[in-house]
Image (cartoon, rainbow, N blue to C red):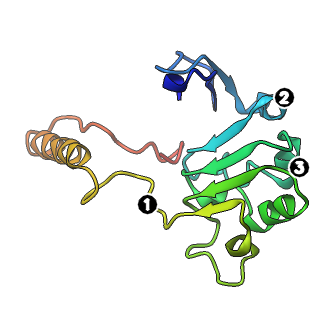
Amino acid sequence: LSGFDTVTVGVRRSKGKLPPYFNEVWTFDELDALLPQADVVVGCLPNTPGTTGLLTETRLRRMKQDALLVNVGRGTLLSTAELAAVLADGHLSGAVLDVCDTEPLPPSSPLWGMENVLLTPHVSGRGFGHDKGTEQLIWEIVMDNLARYLEGKKLRHIVDMNRGY
């Protein structure tokens, strides 16, 4: 988003090195103070015990009334029922959801009928069949790790089971 002259603030487990294209990075402990400042909140977090239910109804209501919520990470970040209640009350300008806590989203969900909600079928990621560059990168990682495995070398891109990603 930095290309659109925005101030991009990240939130993660620990501060660490500032990632490219971010103006600031804070920790989850500071989320409640940051939410009221954001015009757009983008959820692109993994599904871990620390991120499940992170955006509670209380936190959604801490956001500006005209803020936009985008979730392209994991549906477990928030309850779609709580989000629907917040939106029905006129809080938040809208939501863009590529993921939901239940997939597929049940036909009975009020989100389907809300004009300020855009639902996509869990396709925000660019993987096989969507982007040749991403496909090539995936194959390079797989082939590199296969060669490393056959040579008895340490593999790259290993999931840290304690972190959950």
**Kind of element beneath mark 1:** loop
Which residue is drawn at the image coordinates 72% and 59% (left, top)? 116
* Mark 1 surroundings: few (<14), some (14-19) or many (≥20) residues within 10 A: few
Image height check: is 29 above or below 115? above
**Kind of element beneath mark 2:** helix
Q: Quadrant of residue 100?
A: bottom right
**Residue that badge 2 annotates:** 33
Q: CA distance from mark 2 to mark 1?
A: 31 Å
Q: CA distance from mark 2 to mark 3?
A: 13 Å
Q: Position of residue 23 (x, y in %)?
A: 60, 16
Image height check: is 155 above or below 102? above
Q: CA distance from mark 1 to mark 3?
A: 28 Å
Outermost residue on the bottom side: it is: 108
**Residue that badge 1 annotates:** 123
Pointer 1 or 3: first along the chain: 3
Q: Is label 2 in contact with label 1 (beta carbons under 8 Å)? A: no
Q: Is label 2 in contact with label 3 (beta carbons under 8 Å)? A: no
Q: For the residue marked with disc 3, what is the amino acid?
A: Thr
Q: For the residue marked with disc 1, what is the amino acid?
A: Val
Pointer 2 or 3: first along the chain: 2
Which residue is drawn at the image coordinates 78% and 60% (left, top)? 83
* Mark 2 surroundings: few (<14), some (14-19) or many (≥20) residues within 10 A: few
Instruction: Please give the label number shown on residue 58.
Output: 3
